[in-house]
Amino acid sequence: MSYPYQIRSMEQYLSEYKRSVEDPEGFWGGIASHFSWHRKWDKVLDWNFTDPRVKWFSGAQLNITENCLDRHLAERGDQPAIIWEPNDPEEHFRILSYKELHFKVCQFAQALKNNGAKKGDRICIYMPMVPELAIAVLACARIGAIHSVVFGGFSAQSIADRIQDAQCNLVITSDGAHRGNKQIPLKSVIDDALVQCPSVKKVIVLTRTRVPVSMIKGRDTWWEDEIRKVETQGNPACPAETMDAEDMLFILYTSGSTGKPKGVVHTCGGYMVYTNYSFVNVFQYQPGDVYFCTADIGWITGHSYIVYGPLSAGATSLMFEGIPTYPDAGRFWDIVDKFKVNILYTAPTAIRSLMGFGLDFVKNKDLSSLKVLGTVGEPINEEAWHWYHENIGKGRCPIVDTWWQTETAGILISNMAGITPHKPAHATLPLPGVQPLLVDEKGTAIPGGDAAKDGVWFGAGKTGEPISGNLCIKFPWPAILRTTYGDHERCRQTYFATYPGLYFTGDGALRDAEGNYRITGRVDDVLNVSGHRIGTAEVENAINMHTGVVESAVVGYPHDIKGQGIYAFVIFNGDKSDETRVRQAIIQTVARIIGPIAKPDKIQLVGGLPKTRSGKIMRRILRKIAEGETHNLGDTTTLLDPAVVEEIKTGRL
Ligand code: PRX
């Protein structure tokens, strides 16, 4: 498969960018013409950011799995689609060719149909990182069911919230999951969740760890038995359901600054075109390359850059079940060596953690196959960038620092490997079709912050201090979120109301004289812990569920490995004689309500919280204290009771 839309030089990038701004419909229509459609579109783009309403490729019909599977069969049917490396290096790896993956997806899609699943149904997937997870996702897409994948680190309560919100009628899970030397009892967590979920009629359970599970009669069935039934039916061909370009493909829940996680909705056509385009261009994938993204399919990175982007491009996507430090901190490098990985895409938190283990785990590993390195999920600090560049890329691999979000579904700002320059700690330039804009608090555009108007390389040759502002995008790209499931008003409020006419990302950014964007982090109450997005309000609500807790306030603080740690200030009126026990009980509560990923790193028991006279918690002050700043707390004149702050400062952990 060749990629006629793959950009191969800086000049070409600049001209494509210009064209994408001047004629977005011509630009994206041209790219979309390289995919398989059942019916072509009537109109490329129809949009406003007021409702908001965004429609790409209206009138077109397709099935994304035909683009990910069927269309590759003739040319590359025997090429590996998925290489799977298990948690335990002693267990045998698996390779699924495009032919095999196609066969298995069709088989499982038929199994879903046998269990009553149909187009438009919502199906929750809670599985380990095994090929069957990718198969389950694609099988849903094959029959037009909407998948909602929930990451294995979420608790029963979080799963129940997500299942109820989307009214899922089917769940796909496994008995358990291997994670390092731990086992996670996935089915048992699902059983706890389903107590609250009457909408779920069927549960399909894959065998993975062989931990005993309770199978409920009439509801629960084994994956393997379902496959056997399809075999006895003679493996009927499972034709791909015809979907409208704007039909929902999936829902993925993500945290915001308020309330419960929102179900971000992505649709079939635009999502397919954009994830493919960004994959091919950012990573500069060449046919035959082995591409390894270390993310979990439970997050957007896994959806877009393990499954849909790479497979629609006919790439070989390596999937890893385990963790970077098991059986030791050399595991990633062993995998690179073993499968001669050419492109490695991981998170800054993993790099920082592996850096801490020293170079002994890197030496003697053959990393010479690597051509391109990538990072995603959080800002990368310069130290980690250089360590990655020198010790993993041996100074010869470009690093793509890819900025994007669950809501954007694909990479929006990044260099293109070897084509546009990289710069440590900078996501650099927008992809063609992406029109970022920096605004001040009032929403006024900051001069020099508008790539489409001021020039993508606006300051080339000039010197000057970077400008800074809140990062917005002023024009839709094909994979922008369409709504938040069941609550369009929330979508409008969250993303399109802060600055009317713009999509607001929630991130702050700088822009240097060469036009490079540097993402500085969230400007709202959202934390980024090890690249995972967690809302402070969500953690506070969970802490407040504990009977002894009166009130709490959660902020982030710089953490050497996680990027941000979770610092909780808690007013506790229960028995405080054993503070360690109180802290453990609070941590336990958060793990139950949200999941282990949201456990606070520090819990400080306090007598009161700093509030304004109107009762608002002054988080700004708490953030400073958590960061270790005790002198310069900024304006404290509106504080109701300054003594509270003194007490908190003294008790800082
Ligand atoms: O703050 C930004 C940060 O991660 C947020 C999006 O989180 P999520 O939706 O979970 O998606 C993560 C994977 C795409 C952003 O608002 N972020 C993501 N990538 C970068 C980043 N911050 C800095 N640099 C990045 N490359």
Image (tube, rainbow, N blue to C red):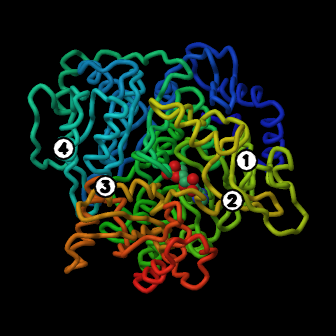
Disc 1 target residue: 436
Q: Are marks 3 and 1 in contact (CB under 8 Å)?
A: no
Q: Is residue 630 visible?
A: yes
Disc 3 target residue: 595
Q: Are marks 2 and 1 in contact (CB under 8 Å)?
A: yes
The residue depicted at 24 percent of the width and 78 percent of the height is 580
Q: Secondary structure at mark 4?
A: helix
In front here: 80 or 23? 23
Callout 4, which amino acid? Answer: Asp
Q: Secondary structure at mark 2?
A: strand
The vertical placement of 574 against 160, above or below, is below
- Placement of the N terminus among the 4 image quadrants: top right
In front here: 504 or 59? 504
The residue depicted at 55 percent of the width and 60 percent of the height is 378
Q: Earlier in the sequence, mark 4 or mark 2?
A: 4
Circle 3 packing at 10 Å, graded few (<14), some (14-19), many (20+), is many
Q: Separation of disc 3 and disc 1 at Cα?
A: 34 Å
Residue 436 percent coordinates (x, y): 73, 47
Disc 4 target residue: 192
Residue 169 percent coordinates (x, y): 28, 26
Q: Earlier in the sequence, mark 2 or mark 1?
A: 1
Disc 2 target residue: 509
Say whether residue 301 is left or right of residue 390: left
Q: Are marks 4 and 2 in contact (CB under 8 Å)?
A: no
Q: Earlier in the sequence, mark 3 or mark 2?
A: 2
- Placement of the C terminus among the 4 image quadrants: bottom left
Q: Secondary structure at mark 3?
A: loop
Q: Earlier in the sequence, mark 3 or mark 1?
A: 1
Q: Ligand 1 near label 1 (Cβ, under 8 Å)?
A: no
